Amino acid sequence: MNLLRLLQQQQQQQQTLLLQQQLLQQRQQQQSPVQDQQQQQLQLQILQQHLLQQQQPQPAKISPVTGTSPLPLPSPTPSIPPNTPTSQATFNTLHYQMLAYNLLSKNFSGQSSASTPSSSNPVSDVPLIKPADDYRSSEEIKTLAEKLVDAVYRQARDYKALNALKYKDTCTRVTPMDLLSQQRSHAHASRQQSLLLPTNAPAGLDPHTVLIERERRIENRVKDRILELESIQDENENPLLDRLSEQYEETIKTVSPQRLQSIIQLKALHLRDKQMRLREEIVKGMEEANKLATSVDRAAYRKIMKQTLKEAKMTEKLERQQRMDREKREKQRHLDYLQTVCNQGRDLIAWHKVHQAKLGKLGKAVLQFHAHVDREEQRRTDRLSKERIRALRNDDEEAYMKLIDEAKDTRLTLLLRQTGAYLESLTRAVVDQQNDPIHMQTGEDSIAPEVEDESEEIMLTDKFGNKIDYFRMAHRIQESVSQPSILVGGTLKDYQLKGLQWMVSLYNNRLNGILADEMGLGKTIQTISLITYLIEKKNQNGPYLIIVPLSTLTNWSLEFEKWAPSITKIVYKGVPEVRKEIQKRQIRHRDFQVLLTTFDYIIKDRPALSKIKWLHMIIDEGHRMKNTNSKLTSVLRQYYSSRYRLILTGTPLQNNLPELWALLNFILPKIFNSVKSFEEWFNTPFSNQGVQDKVELNEEEQLLIIKRLHKVLRPFLLRRLKKDVEAELPDKVERVIKCKLSALQTRLYSQMKKHGMLFTGVSGETGRTSIKGLNNTIMQLRKICNHPFVFEEVERAINPYKLSNELLYRTSGKFELLDRILPKLKATNHRVLIFFQMTQIMDIMEDFCIYRGYRHLRLDGSTKSDDRSRLLEVFNAVDSPYFVFLLSTRAGGLGLNLQTADTVIIFDSDWNPHQDLQAQDRAHRIGQTKEVRIFRLITENSIEENILARAQYKLDIDGKVIQAGKFDHRSTEEDREAFLRSLLEDKTDDQEEGGNEENDDFDDEELNLMLKRSDQEYAVFAKIDLERQRSEAEEWRRRYNDDRNKPERLMQDWELPDIYRYEHVVPHDTLDDSAMLGRGQRSKEAIRYDDGMTEGQWLRTIEKEAAEAEIALGKRENRTAHKSKKRSRIG
């Protein structure tokens, strides 16, 4: 029976355990769904152990709470039959356990707030629930239930009171529950509580915070009490605060005992702070008194221990051993550390090497990849560029535009679009020029449609509906021409007939132009043929105004007499009286067809000449019109009227594009009306000189811009070269010969370059060095390079008596070279033209020619017009005895025919290279039968090299703009393209070859190879060299009786006077403030840019210039005669 009862109890206990486990799992899932699974399993295990412990009999022990023994264990009870139903007490017990668990999970504890911390039991005040036995009475179960309900009731009541206090509005007081900011888990609150307690238990209170809160609450209560007592009034309705200062005897007499107690309490509260400070001081003093005074003499409290000698030795030995061990350990530790550092360093170096090798391989691979991509892209770009250039060369504009669109080259598209827009604007301007009012005044019909609105697009088409291009628009009317019958001087050549046809086309299309044939191709004859053609075929009898330089006026007159003697012409020149007579007799009655005059007379006699309405104005050497602001240009533009204008020039572009525009603006003012736009479109390929931040153009862009420029110029410019039209014309070979400086030139050049002045000698009066200050340093350096005797002081120091001897060539490198060249040319029957920039050098050259016995002629700016013609006739005579012709580059390089000479020597180069070209063509022109040699003398390492480089740059522009354009109306597009491409190529190889040819020092053999025109001449030159060396050695032996110490041909340092051999320091007192400090700030004064003369005064001044020139010429002739007389007297 007992066994059955026990089994039944076990079955009930298991059911209860399963039910509690299910309830616990549900509650845990509701309260903390994220709780750790392991913790849940642990709680279940603890609950199972707790229930099993309740089933096992336990020994009696003292309760930790009540101090009494727990409830007695139930004795064995009789067994219960298995089919007996569960009693009501068991269900009640289970019900109360579940109720207690739910309350505890909601933060209800089974003990009061003042109880000790909870133990491992769920509720400490409630006894453990034992299994129900049959012998246990229902009163015991009821007592247990009542205790549990009572504990739960008390806990709920306390919880309600605390919640009410928590939400109570308190101003100054804070309860401990208010300090609980948030609930925390049980694990953080107390690790000693049972795992059966809820995880959301409150955290424990901070004692320090509770103490501070308690002190604050006491302070607030004290303050409230003080305020309350101070507000109490006595019997006289006075506040007690006013009676605090009274004495005790006075107070007890006037107040009641109740008010007296209040006053006493108020005074006590006022003394509270003082009492607290007093008590703190007393406590502090007591603490100080109780301390042991160890800081006074610590040695008094030290116990002295005596140490034996043996102990000292053992201690010392032990300390030594410990010290050695410690040092050994530290040393070993240091070595280990160093070894670790070294190992780390080696590992780091090895890693970096490997990493660097990887990076190097990667970098090389990236570079190779990009190089491959670049090569492929460059091949593609080059291929497209070649195709575009091929289309551009073939003038296939449609294909070129298509290739540009494919290449997406915005720069080329922009260039093409802009230049195309400019060409369209020029096309409109051509129409306006053809319909000029000057032509309409003569009653001629319009040859081109008028444009009323310039903004409208012009679409000029031919009879087939095709768009007319720019050139065809300018030359719409074509006419075949032949040589006029009144042109009787000879037969025109083919290229001259084409030039005539081009000029007639300009006349028919009411346009003007520039005839820019190379010098020597007969521009004069072609102009005369135009005049005769217009007179004969067009019945245009003039008047024709031909403006020429003074030096070519006679040549023009002779050409008219030779080719067109039937034309009535007037040579308008002479003194004012002669010109006035011509005006009265011929000009006023219009008894002429052609008027020949000079630039000066156009300005001087403007009132008389500008009254005539000229049919055609022809300007020879028209490059003088390159300055739009010059007097000549402004006078012709403002006062002279002509229906047609023609400019003749051999050098249409001398320095830059604006000069070319000036010529075009003069002949076609409506077409070329803006130099800014003209220069913006076409000056880009040539603007790479002296510009830091320049936009580099590639070859295709330069080619495109230059071809567009050629397209603009071609209708109005005709230029042919001698090598293209005259195949039988002999060649022209130009060589640059570099000359060395003599010792005297070197010293003078250094002084001028360093100090800007020359040291000319020592003054006998003061004993100081004489200084010659000079302006325009570049000009002075050029003089020194030519000859030092240009300076009178230098000649006086070197050649005091001004004798004509070997010093003339020994002091100058150029003269020394000429002294070797001229005898060879004279011996081989060559005739020489020598061009100079300075008349002073020409004077010295005359002395040299007289010294060497060369018969010569001279022509410069002071030579009269009649004398010019006579000198030309004398030199060009068949058996002329004159070997050398000395000419000024500016005066002798225009309109002279000196083809009897076959050698031209440019003694010093001009800044304008076209001046030198004009000078060269005096000999290399039609009629020349010999090969022409041009020798340009350049002093090495001097300013002349810079001048030559600048001149070469200007020639490069002319080559790209004019020569590459092939404005001969005969060359094909391929010829022009090939020539232009050769100019755009790099000139490095040519310069290197030229540098090899132009050696710094020419010996006799190299000079002979340069001069010779045949092998026979070379043998003659070698013989002349030997003869010259022998004669110089004999002369030196005869003078100084010395065969060994013969000096060089150029003067050496040891031969110079002392003033030139030593370095001089410029004394400060010889310089003014402006030389030492500079001129300073420019004075800001009012400046008048006019000459202050009236028109009449200016004309009279111009007339006086001729007379002054004649006076100067007379003085020069007298000086020359005086020198000749002196030399003959000395000889």
Image (cartoon, rainbow, N blue to C red):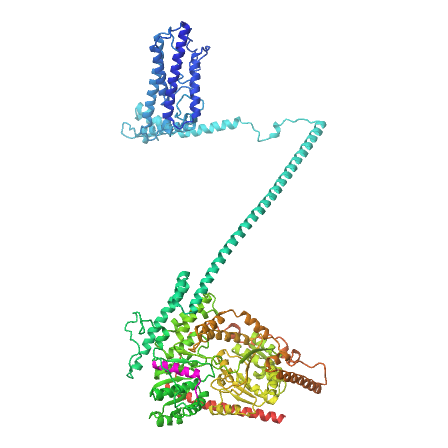
Give percent across and percent down for residue 163: 33, 25
Residue occupying the far front of the picture:
464
Magenta stretch? 491-508
Tell me: residue 262, above or below residue 596.
above
Considering the whole magenta stretch, tell me its main secondary structure: helix
User: For the C terminus, which image quadrant?
Assistant: bottom right
Residue 51 seen by the camera? yes
Nearer to me, 254 or 812: 812
> Toward which corner of the image does residue 1005 lie, by quadrant?
bottom right
Q: Is residue 163 left or right of residue 339?
A: left
> Toward which corner of the image does residue 208 lie, by quadrant?
top left
Nearer to me, 920 or 407: 407
Which residue is rendered at x = 58% and y = 73% of the image? 995
Nearer to me, 351 or 1039: 351
Tell me: residue 348, above or below residue 816.
above
Give percent across and percent down for residue 505: 36, 81
Nearer to me, 640 or 883: 883
Q: Is residue 960 left or right of residue 536?
A: right
Q: Is residue 505 magenta?
A: yes
Tell me: residue 114, above or below residue 388.
above
Q: Is residue 550 magenta?
A: no
Q: Is residue 865 left or right of residue 361?
A: left
Give percent across and percent down for residue 140: 36, 9
Q: Is residue 843 left or right of residue 195?
A: right
User: For the N terminus, which image quadrant?
Assistant: top left
Give percent across and percent down for residue 900: 53, 88
Residue 1098 seen by the camera? no
> Toward which corner of the image does residue 134 lie, by quadrant?
top left
Q: Give the number of marks.
A: 0
